[in-house]
Amino acid sequence: MTDHDRPGVPASDAAGEAAMTEWAELLVAQARADGVELTGENGLLTGLVRRVLQTGLEGRDDRASGL
């Protein structure tokens, strides 16, 4: 099954993309409401990328140690 708006994209991928878009919109709206910059040293994106990378590396370390 594919998404009618995006031929060739499985519906499950389109649903995941829609959820990710909604999540991103919520993050940006909350950051703006809180006066948080999107970019820069203390910006939302910097912190988010840092957290995602740290989480990914921690998961990799856990798999390597057999946990």
Image (cartoon, rainbow, N blue to C red):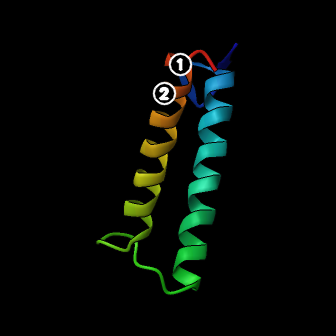
Measured from the top left, where is residue 17 in percent x and y?
A: 59, 37
Residue at numbered disc 1: 65
Which quadrant would the N terminus be assigned to in this image? top right
Q: Residue at x 56, y 26 (%)?
A: 62
Crowd class of label 1 (few under 14; some 14 to 19; many from 20; radius 10 Å)? few
| Count of numbered tags | 2
Task: Look at label 2 and name its amino acid.
Answer: Asp
Q: Is 40 or 60 nearer to us in this picture?
A: 60
Q: Is 21 or 6 nearer to us in this picture?
A: 21
Crowd class of label 2 (few under 14; some 14 to 19; many from 20; radius 10 Å)? few
Task: Look at label 1 and name its amino acid.
Answer: Ser
Q: Is 60 or 23 nearer to us in this picture?
A: 60
Above or below, 52 against 1 in this view is below
Measured from the top left, where is residue 64 in percent x and y?
A: 49, 17
Above or below, 29 against 47 in this view is below
Q: Residue at x 53, y 19 (%)?
A: 65
Residue contact between numbered discs 2 and 1, judged by CB atoms under 8 Å: yes
Residue at numbered disc 2: 61
Q: Tell me the distance, in whole angstroms, between the alpha carbons under discs 2 and 1.
A: 6 Å
Measured from the top left, where is residue 49 in percent x and y?
A: 41, 52
Above or below, 4 against 16 in this view is above
The answer to whether residue 8 is seen in the rendering is no
Measured from the top left, where is residue 29 in percent x and y?
A: 58, 73
